[in-house]
């Protein structure tokens, strides 16, 4: 790796020969670079790399430093020269334990700490103030208590100090927590000898160095040069460690920028940077010198101007804020843009449009772009939105807490049901069935529910669909063939249950995973690549991470069962591996939080969701136990008032914004939304120069993506208002794209343009065709609708159809079994429960509508005087190659002995009198009756005596409405219904079907495929 060109200030750092040195510089001034060069220069001058200790603020930064150093020094290093303070402290403690012949120390996991705290809290509650006793057994209290203990340890506050502070400042909770801390320390020392709390590591190393002079001397002689990057994220424990290792005027070089300190919530104190010269004086007692880096090597003049405007609001003097740019003006980037959009959707579109332009027009690689958000919750929607617009997005599973990753969450949900942590409620079982290991989707689940219900009713049972699904999944009984899809989940749970009896949590998870059988499919998808492949890859990684976590958990806590592991993983709010070394760097855009973006940089950066409601986040971070107050007391000696705390929070949020806007090398886009509910953040004002108007709400730019381009070109080609020249140019460009096989560019792939795939008729003459009387009616209304619905084009309406069947069934039951009104109502109640219409207002309205229908049916039945011949009577007649088959709701005998066809209607509309006279369905039933279609029921030689429609679904009125069709014998041509059947037969034998527009089009389920309708026109035009 070639040596970077250093500016004079940087050169001064590299040439620093001995003693303490503070390197102060803003973002992009090359602080990290100069530290690496300093170490490289010392090594070249003869210093053994093993005598260098380079401390970084996070494992990811340490890994990046190691890489850079290795490239500059070359050769093989004995031990990692760059580490986090925790890693260094742990190594020191381990080496010392080995030397002393003690067991190798290990880190206490969060789960172990949580278990001990929860157990102790379950003990004597009387030591705690009365007001918090009800909360002692809650997870939130245990978390807060653990947090308080960690922060106290970091600040060197032992239990005695905490109790004293509690008494002095009238904080009885601190006094109680101090007693608890004492007990906790004793228990962990006994139960986990050699185990350290992570927060305790640096303090433990400090104690070791203080207590054992020989160890201290050895470390001091070994660590000839100590270098600390990002000292602005230091905490008091690190300062104590450095004092011992490199105090007294030894070689100690630190760098930092107090304006970019953003890890206050982890204990960082930016003020420590300013105190460095006096905390670490030279050997002669004078203050440590400093070098101020003022030349910015990342930000061009325009981006530097933005940085200056934001930093001007940070308060304090900040000499590091006065920077000049070494980057040429322009630098190939458009600089800064601030955009306010009308909705979150528009915001994502704008970001996607910007990134695609930068990639396509300026050649910025995807890997050199990042999208930053304030809150982790915004990551997933942003990633999804960008991917939708054709922006490749790096999916870093490790940035999401393990339990929140979909395939892991689903496995944990299975485990939770298995170990009894979650009750198997119907909703939960539905979720499991439709999750990644259940194998169903909502449509198939609905079919399963119906099938289980039918079987239950057939067997005379009364259980609801919800209960049946739960029983089918958790039980071991037979299920009907159409509900067999639930058996997959049943097998998964059974496998997990067998393993739970004998194995560890790892075994149980493995049994669940194996039984689910999804691995081969995911592997295949991952190997196939593309968007689905990336998702499958990520899912497999997440599951592997879960197995890793389970393995470690089992190793550390052999006695803890699956339930404890479940609590442990579900309690993790942050990614376990956050901040670890970067993994693969795919050709994709990085989407991450601003905290995770610290000390990184890209060519193009978009900072999004800069909303007043969430950034600045001014919610007080303090807790029931007063952790923030404790930190304040330790660092300033006093507790800040509410106003001061808000002011401190605002300053921290501004620093975070400063970090965000200083990550870009070439161009920066900042976006916000103004939709009436959320507003752009006040932080945006810092970006905008006073002499320019504030950004107003605007439309997103056009996304330069192939699908979008193809769509626009196709629209231009087909636009009759466009000029011939434009249409020809659009056609030419489409031809170019089609040659490159861009999907949708070739007219062969356009709707409606391909030639008819099969010119043969739907049903050729001679082939049997079965028609019901109602289908005859449907064909005559609109042949196209009839054909499309017959070919499967019916969508939705399942509940409506089921309600229609319910009313018809009730009518049949009432007639066939001579039920009383009460019995009909009881049957209705049972059937309604089975319909599973939900609980919302829509369901309640539908229920009222059907109540009215049943009421009308009962009224009509009570008033009906004609004799009932039969209900649900099958009718079947063959005419040539047509079979007319249907089922008549009722057949009644009139006073003259003739038979009348009765049909119940549950729709709201009624035909006119003239239409009833020619009603095809009634007519065809009458004709079929006369032709012997119901002979098994009514005998031969029947004379049809007319038809009757009974309307039950009217919008108003308490009584059913009847409409009569005269007997066929009274018509001029008594065979007119047969002529209709032949007309349908002839139509079905043709290859084309006409769209007949009429009042019935409003509710047509195939409108979107109908060329006579605007929404369907695109199919053929
Ligand atoms: S919208 Fe009207 S014309 Fe078109 S298919 Fe449906 S019923 Fe026929």
Image: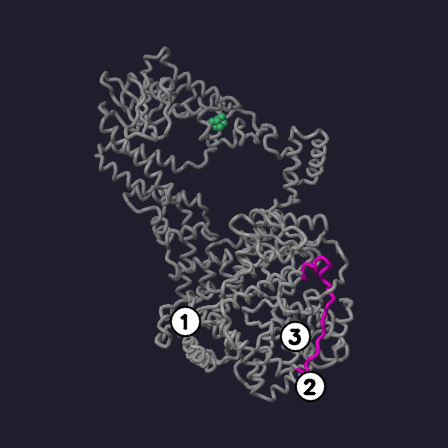
* Ligand 1 lies under 8 Å from the Cβ of mark 3: no
Mark 2 Cα shell of 10 Å, populated few (<14), some (14-19), many (≥20): some
How many numbered marks appear?
3
Q: Earlier in the sequence, mark 2 or mark 3?
A: 3
State the image coordinates of residue 233 (x, y, percent, origin top left): 60, 71
* Ligand 1 lies under 8 Å from the Cβ of mark 1: no
Mark 3 Cα shell of 10 Å, populated few (<14), some (14-19), many (≥20): many
**CB-based contact (under 8 Å), mark 1 and mark 3:** no
**CB-based contact (under 8 Å), mark 2 and mark 3:** no
In the image, 34 versus 867, the foreground residue is: 34
Specify how the rendered protein is coloured.
one colour
State the CA–CA distance, disc 1 to disc 3.
37 Å
Quadrant showing the N terminus: bottom right
Q: Which mark is residue 228?
A: 3
Task: Determine the image quadrant of residue 929.
Answer: top left
Left or right: 275, with 483 as reference point: right
Question: Circle 1 is placed at which residue position?
Answer: 118
In the image, 212 versus 740, the foreground residue is: 212
- Residue interval drawn in magenta: 281-308
State the CA–CA distance, disc 2 to disc 3.
19 Å
Task: Identify the residue at image location x=51%, y=69%.
Answer: 552
Task: Identify the residue at image location x=48%, y=81%.
Answer: 161
Secondary structure under tag 1 reads helix
* Residue 738 vertical position relative to residue 575 in the rendered view, above or below: above
State the image coordinates of residue 19 (x, y, percent, origin top left): 70, 81
Q: Which mark is residue 283?
A: 2
């Amino acid at each position: 790796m070639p040596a970077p060109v250093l500016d004079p200030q940087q050169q001064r750092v590299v040439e620093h020969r001995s003693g303490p040195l503070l390197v102060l510089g803003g973002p992009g001034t090359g602080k990290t670079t100069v530290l690496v060069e300093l170490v490289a220069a010392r090594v070249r001058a003869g210093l053994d790399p093993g005598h260098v200790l380079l401390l970084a603020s996070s494992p990811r930064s340490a890994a990046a430093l190691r890489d850079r150093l290795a490239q500059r020094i070359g050769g093989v290093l004995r031990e990692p020269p760059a580490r986090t303070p925790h890693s260094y402290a742990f190594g020191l403690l381990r080496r010392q334990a080995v030397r002393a012949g003690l067991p190798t120390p290990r880190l206490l996991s969060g789960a172990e700490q949580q278990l001990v705290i929860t157990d102790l809290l379950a003990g004597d509650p009387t030591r705690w103030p009365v007001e918090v006793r009800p909360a002692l057994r809650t997870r939130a209290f245990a978390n807060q208590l653990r947090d308080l203990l960690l922060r106290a340890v970091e600040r060197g506050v032992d239990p005695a100090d905490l109790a004293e502070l509690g008494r002095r400042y009238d904080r009885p909770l601190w006094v109680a927590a101090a007693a608890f801390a004492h007990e906790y320390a004793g228990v962990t020392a006994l139960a986990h000898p050699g185990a350290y709390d992570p927060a305790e590591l640096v303090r433990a190393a400090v104690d070791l160095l203080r207590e054992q002079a020989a160890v201290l001397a050895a470390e001091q002689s070994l660590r000839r040069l100590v270098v600390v990057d990002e000292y602005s994220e230091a905490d008091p424990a690190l300062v104590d460690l450095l004092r011992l290792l490199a105090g007294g005027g030894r070689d100690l070089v630190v760098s930092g920028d107090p304006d970019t300190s953003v890890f206050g919530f982890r204990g960082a104190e930016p003020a420590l940077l300013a105190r460095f010269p006096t905390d670490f004086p030279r050997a002669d007692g004078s203050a440590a010198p400093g070098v101020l880096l003022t030349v910015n090597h990342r930000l061009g003049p325009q981006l530097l101007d933005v940085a200056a405007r934001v930093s001007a609001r940070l308060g304090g003097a900040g000499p590091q804020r006065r920077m000049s740019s070494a980057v040429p003006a322009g630098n190939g980037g458009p600089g800064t843009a601030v955009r306010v959009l009308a909705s979150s959707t528009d915001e994502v579109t704008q970001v996607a449009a910007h990134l695609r332009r930068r990639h396509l027009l300026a050649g910025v690689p995807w890997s050199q772009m990042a999208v930053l958000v304030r809150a982790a919750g915004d990551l997933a929607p942003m990633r999804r939105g960008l991917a939708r617009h054709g922006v490749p997005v790096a999916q870093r599973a490790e940035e999401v807490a393990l339990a929140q990753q979909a395939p892991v969450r689903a496995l944990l949900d299975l485990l939770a049901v298995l170990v009894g942590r979650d009750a198997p409620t119907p909703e939960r079982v539905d979720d499991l069935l439709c999750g990644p290991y259940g194998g169903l989707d909502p449509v198939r689940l609905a079919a399963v529910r119906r099938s289980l219900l039918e079987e239950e009713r057939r067997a005379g049972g009364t259980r609801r669909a919800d209960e049946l699904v739960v029983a089918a999944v958790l039980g071991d009984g037979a299920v009907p063939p159409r509900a067999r899809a639930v058996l997959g989940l049943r097998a998964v749970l059974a496998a997990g249950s067998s393993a739970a009896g004998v194995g560890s949590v790892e075994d149980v998870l493995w049994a669940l995973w194996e039984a689910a059988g999804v691995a081969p499919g995911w592997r295949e998808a991952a190997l196939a690549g593309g968007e689905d492949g990336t998702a499958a890859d990520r899912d497999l990684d997440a599951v592997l991470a879960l197995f890793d976590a389970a393995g470690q958990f089992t190793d550390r806590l052999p006695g803890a069962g699956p339930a404890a592991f479940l609590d442990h993983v579900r309690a993790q709010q942050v990614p376990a591996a956050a901040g670890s070394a970067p993994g693969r760097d795919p050709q994709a855009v990085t989407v991450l939080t601003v905290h995770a973006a610290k000390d990184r940089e890209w060519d193009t950066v978009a900072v999004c969701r800069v909303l007043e409601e969430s950034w600045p986040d001014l919610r007080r971070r303090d807790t029931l136990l007063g952790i923030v107050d404790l930190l304040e007391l330790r660092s300033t000696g006093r507790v800040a008032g509410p106003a001061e705390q808000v002011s401190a929070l605002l300053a921290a949020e501004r620093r975070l914004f400063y970090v965000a806007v200083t990550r870009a090398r070439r161009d920066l886009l900042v976006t916000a939304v103004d939709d009436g509910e959320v507003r752009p953040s006040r932080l945006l004002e810092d970006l905008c120069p006073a002499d320019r108007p504030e950004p107003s709400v605007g439309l997103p730019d056009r996304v330069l993506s192939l699908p979008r381009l193809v769509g626009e070109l196709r629209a231009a080609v087909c636009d009759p208002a466009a000029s011939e020249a434009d249409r020809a140019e659009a056609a030419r460009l489409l031809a170019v794209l089609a040659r490159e096989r861009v999907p949708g560019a070739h007219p062969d792939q356009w709707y409606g343009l391909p030639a008819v795939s099969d010119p043969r008729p739907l049903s050729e003459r001679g082939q049997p065709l079965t028609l019901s009387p109602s289908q005859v009616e449907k064909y005559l209304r609109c042949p196209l609708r009839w054909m499309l619905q017959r070919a499967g084009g019916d969508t939705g309406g399942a509940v409506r159809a089921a309600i229609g069947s319910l009313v018809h069934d009730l009518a049949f039951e009432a007639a066939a079994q001579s039920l009383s009104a009460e019995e009909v109502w009881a049957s209705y109640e049972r059937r309604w429960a089975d319909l599973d219409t939900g609980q919302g207002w829509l369901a309640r309205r539908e229920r009222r509508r059907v109540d009215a229908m049943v009421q009308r049916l009962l009224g009509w039945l009570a008033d009906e005087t004609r004799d009932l011949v039969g209900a649900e009577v099958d009718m079947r007649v063959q005419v040539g190659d047509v079979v007319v088959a249907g089922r008549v709701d009722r057949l009644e005998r009139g006073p003259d002995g003739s038979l009348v066809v009765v049909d119940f209607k549950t729709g709201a509309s009624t035909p006119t009198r003239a239409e009833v006279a020619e009603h095809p369905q009634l007519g065809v039933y009458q004709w079929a009756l006369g032709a012997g279609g119901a002979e098994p029921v009514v005998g031969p030689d029947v004379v049809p005596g007319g038809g009757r429609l009974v309307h039950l679904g009217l919008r108003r009125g308490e009584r059913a409405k009847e409409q009569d069709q005269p007997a066929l014998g009274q018509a001029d041509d008594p065979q007119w219904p047969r002529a209709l059947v032949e007309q349908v037969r002839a139509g079905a034998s043709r290859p084309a079907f006409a769209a007949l527009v009429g009042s019935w089009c409003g509710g047509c389920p195939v409108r979107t495929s109908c060329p006579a309708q605007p929404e369907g026109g695109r199919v053929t035009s």
